[in-house]
Amino acid sequence: MGTNQINITIQNDLVNFFEKWNTLRPSLHDQLESFFRRWPGRLAIKQQKVEASTIDFYRVFSLPDFFMRFPAATKAKGIRSYRTNIWDIAGVGSDELKNMGILSWWLSHDAEHGLEGSILRGILSTLAKQYRRANAPAFELFSSGYRIGRESTVWDERDRASRMDIVIENDNALIIIEGKINATESVSMEDGVAQLDRYCNLAKKLANNRQWAVVYLTPRKGIDEDRRKKQPRLLELTWKEVGNVIKRESKRLPKSEATRVLMESTYRSFSQF
């Protein structure tokens, strides 16, 4: 059979499909006629029981035959929902506030995703491997539960406000996460103190006798060794590393589960920063 004959056959199949589809539902004309026949004064009408019809859609239109004839459609058929980036569709992009909001949701131990504290555990495990000194609080300190604050405002002794992206704490430990995507660390115009140094000073005071750390989340690490020595509890993570934690945890779930689809979308979003 030649190419033209195949195209004609496919066109006929499509025409037949839509013609038969139209016969399965009443026309707009019939629906309007029925509506005006009942209006006005006849709204309290009992619903009529509609008998279900058994229709063999495979006979109406053969999808395997369609994919066999269209190579492009065959390629599209291989696309699955778990490859779709839901956050791109939602317009999150590289917006720092929105992405930090997504991260705080994954970190929550009582959110709807049902992962409890597994993402926080994975992040703390990643930090522990990177920093041989015990600068990152162990997850065991959070095993009894914890609170997460977003955009938390803290005032220092000079009555200056510092807005912290994510604050994770309980009676045992305190972690502050400052996230950047398209921006860099700011420096105070008043006294020249860098943002992360100010956060470390505040965290130490807020923690009192608790374990604490400040985590700087960026596309690429950039804190030099001298500053690490001055601020040993200032730790770094990349968005890709956080994405890897989420991807690793997602493999514990069935591929068809909605939470796994969201986790894989989050991995793809975070990995692009």
Image (tube, grey):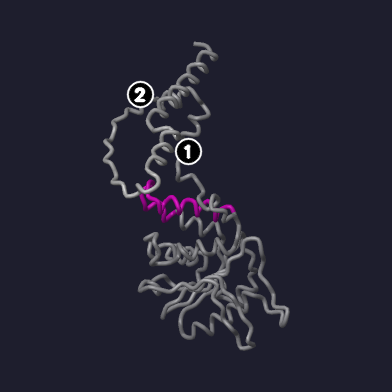
Q: Which residue is mark 2?
A: 59
Look at 63% across and 68% down and name the residue there.
223
Q: Is residue 107 above or below residue 78?
A: below
> Which residue is outermost to the bottom?
157
Magenta-drawn stretch contains 254: yes
Residue 206 x %, y %:
51, 83
Q: Which mark is residue 79?
A: 1
State which tag comes first along the sequence, 1 or 2: 2
Look at 48% across and 29% down and name the residue there.
74
Label 1 secondary element:
loop
Front residue of 26 and 227:
26
Look at 56% across and 75% down and name the residue there.
232
Q: Which mark is residue 201?
A: none
Real-space Cα separation, disc 1 to disc 2, in angstroms: 25 Å
Q: Is residue 22 above or below residue 175?
A: above
Amino acid type shown at disc 2: Arg
Q: Pointer 1 and pointer 2: residues touching (CB < 8 Å)?
A: no
Residue 219 x %, y %:
61, 59
Residue 63 x %, y %:
41, 27
Q: Main secondary structure of the magenta part?
A: helix
Span shown in magenta: 248-272
Q: Is residue 191 above or below residue 60?
A: below
- Badge 2: residue crowd in 10 Å (few <14, some 14–19, many ≥20): few
Q: Is residue 240 left or right of residue 222?
A: left
